[in-house]
Structures are given as C-alpha cells and as structure tokens.
Amino acid sequence: MSVTLAKGGNVSLTKAAPNLTQVQIGLGWDARSTTGAPFDLDASALLCAGGRVLGDEYFVFYNNLRSPEGSVEHQGDNLTGDGDGDDEVVQVNLDLVPVQVDKVVFAVSIYDAEARIQNFGQVSNAYIRVVNLTDGREIARYDLTEDASTETAMIFGELYRYQGEWKFRAVGQGYASGLRGIALDFGVNVQ
C-alpha cells in the first residue's frame, strides 16, 4: 500500500519494502493550455554528500542521462508532458549509489521559463512517486499543492540515507532562479 505524504513528510523505504534494491522515481505534471510557447518541464537528479553534488558528472538530467557508476539513470526527456502517468522517470539502483552519497535530490524545472514567461503557477497536478522496480508497486507519493507563481524550478523530493536505511522525503521547495539556481545551490559548475 502506498503512503501519501504531505510537504516535509518522510517514509522509510527500507521498512515499507524490505530487500528493496531498485526504485523508479516517477514525476508528473500538467501544464496549463496556453496560446504562448509550449511548456517543456525537465526532471533532474543530484547525487549529494553533505549538501553538495559529488561532481558535475553526478548531476543527472537530459544532457547527462547517467551517473558515472550507473546508480542513477534518467529515462529520457519528455518534451511535451502529454498523456497520463509519469512524464519523466529516473531509475535508482540503491545498491550502486556511492557510499559517500547521503541523498539524491529530484528537481523539475521549466525549460527556458524566463523567455517563455512561464512558472509553476501555470502547472497543475504535479507529483513525485517512488515505485519498487522489482514488483511495480508504488511505495510513496507526494502531490505538490502549493501555489508557485514565481518559481521556475522546484525540488519535488529526495531519497536519503539515515542510520542504514533509505528514506524518501517530500520537499516541495521552489526556486525563482530556475534549474541554474538549484545547480548553483548544490555546487554544480554552471557555465
């Protein structure tokens, strides 16, 4: 049975699904119909130690689909977000995540948001969910509900290690500075 989380809530994945080794992080949203430019939302993952990404190669997104050791793999960029279900998916092999990584942060940003005059206030039904890749069962879900009318990127959630367990936390933190702001906050070298 899936756990529905509120902002800031967490769940022990280790306890919810004993022997869990691989998860699929599904991210979804619906962009407002508009006469302007189409929306293109992009999911990304940052493998962090002490609040900083291990290195630029540990920032997984549409231009770097896989972490160096293969523990985190983006399943591809969905340019439109059309259709039901997960719009973008990131798979995580928990056994392969480097031991120094204490959390994997999952963010979603609006591509070229400033030029297109777009923000998360124009996005609805946004969510992140954790699925056991072995049996396809949803373990946890967080539906983002806050009004984010100035934000162009958001951290949806994070997987983190705590006393030998893997846990998931619903974050819902917005950034008006887009993906660049998130990347800079976590120490990614941005051109």
Image (cartoon, helix red, strand yellow):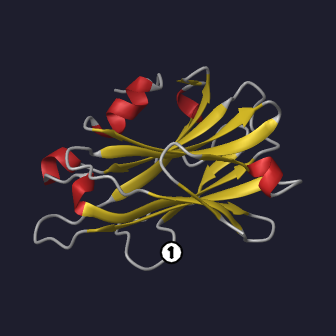
Left or right: 176 in relation to 114: right
Farthest residue, direction bottom: 83
- Where does label 1 land, which residue? 85
Q: Quadrant of the N terminus?
A: bottom right
Q: Quadrant of residue 77?
A: bottom left
Residue 68 percent coordinates (x, y): 67, 37
The residue at 40%/54% (across/down) is 42
Q: Is residue 61 visible?
A: no
Farthest residue, direction right: 19
Q: Quadrant of residue 4?
A: bottom right
Residue 9 percent coordinates (x, y): 56, 46
Left or right: 145 in relation to 135: left
Viewer-nearest residue: 30 or 6: 6
Q: Is residue 145 above or below residue 11?
A: below
Q: Is residue 29 visible?
A: yes
Viewer-nearest residue: 3 or 127: 3
The residue at 57%/32% (across/down) is 57
Crowdedness near tag 1: few (<14), some (14–19) or many (≥20) residues, C-alpha within 10 Å: few
Residue 149 percent coordinates (x, y): 20, 50
Q: Is residue 94 above or below residue 144?
A: above
Q: Is residue 64 above or below residue 186?
A: below
The kind of residue on which mark 1 rests is: Gly
The residue at 66%/46% (across/down) is 72
Left or right: 177 in relation to 144: left
